[in-house]
Amino acid sequence: MADVVALQIQRFLDHLTVERGLSVNTLAAYRHDLTRYSSFLGARGVVDACRVDDLSVAAFVAGLSASTHDGGKPYRATSVVRTLASVRSFHRFLMREGETDRNPAALVPRPRLPRALPRPISVDDVARLVVAPDGGTARGLRDRAMLETLYGAGLRVSELVGLDVDDVDLEEGSLRVLGKGGKERDVPLGRYACDAVSAYLTRGRPSLATTRSRAALFLNQRGGRLSRQGCSKMLAAQAKRAGIAKRVTPHTLRHSFATHLLEGGADVRVVQELLGHASVATTQVYTLVTKEHLREVYYTTHPRAKRPQPVGREMRA
């Protein structure tokens, strides 16, 4: 009997590609999650996703939570939650297509996520980081422009490496960014970032460009579009060069962008628009970071914020 599940999953992925216009990376995540789900159903003899019941989905989630990968590492709760969300979306699609009248994943409880706050770096660390690249080389000019743009516009790494030369308006001081779900937004670009990008376009990019470069803004050593992995490696190297001990990723600079704006008095809804968040609830996590910072500053600087130290007997005598 033909494996109907595989065909149903492929139709769902085609729907995500054509009708919802999801990015290549998001589609890859859905494919990865649902391939694992399909294997689980196949091992249980299920060949049609419309025949899946709640207990099967719950067993899949429980098995995933208890399993390991890469030599014994347990799956993180965030990965399990994302996989369950993919399964729910898949079954919801089958309902919309009229193939079934219920979603067996709808009531399956998702694992509780630990509350992890973003970890921005300080303004001083940012200042040291962006001047770390060697401005005398094409690669250094590129790295400086990338760092200033990541922090200056709060971009996701996929948005940064996806930029074309024509997406930058240096006179206006803005970027045209293609975000999640194919949504475009215009983002202001500050003076430092504009100056760095201008220097790179004038003195750096021409040295890196080849016939394969086309419209890509940030190029690798071979003249092709720089990848997300290439950007992450660059950032790690420049953070080390700047003497920053903590781990710094492209998303660290996005976190820092949002946190520093809020600490400076920006409205959370303005920050939401700048980040390209669909919901303000996603942005509000950064307000928790700033509150935590305020408490830390208060308790370390106010003279009567700390509990008094016990006075020794000899001082009371």
Image: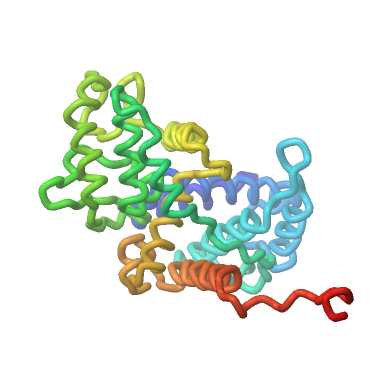
Look at 62% across and 78% down and name the residue there.
Answer: 305
**Residue 43 position in % (x across, y down):** 75, 47
Asked if residue 199 is positioned above or below residue 274 in the image, the reply reads above
Residue nearest the viewer, comparing 208 with 243? 243
Mark count: 0
- Whether residue 101 is visible to the viewer of this picture, yes or no, is no
Residue nearest the viewer, comparing 95 with 167? 167
Residue placed furthest toward the left? 171
Look at 41% across and 42% down and name the residue there.
Answer: 128
**Residue 57 position in % (x across, y down):** 69, 62
- Whether residue 103 is visible to the viewer of this picture, yes or no, is yes
Asked if residue 68 is positioned above or below residue 255 in the image, the reply reads above
**Residue 11 position in % (x across, y down):** 46, 51
Q: The N terminus is located in which quarter?
A: top right
Asked if residue 97 is positioned above or below residue 143 in the image, the reply reads below
Q: The C terminus is located in which quarter?
A: bottom right
Look at 27% across and 51% down and name the residue there.
Answer: 177
Answer left or right for 173 relative to 229.
left
Look at 38% across and 64% down and name the residue there.
Answer: 277
Q: Name which quarter of the figure residue 199 lies in.
A: top left
**Residue 296 position in % (x across, y down):** 57, 68
How is the model colour-coded?
A: rainbow
Answer left or right for 163 relative to 230.
left
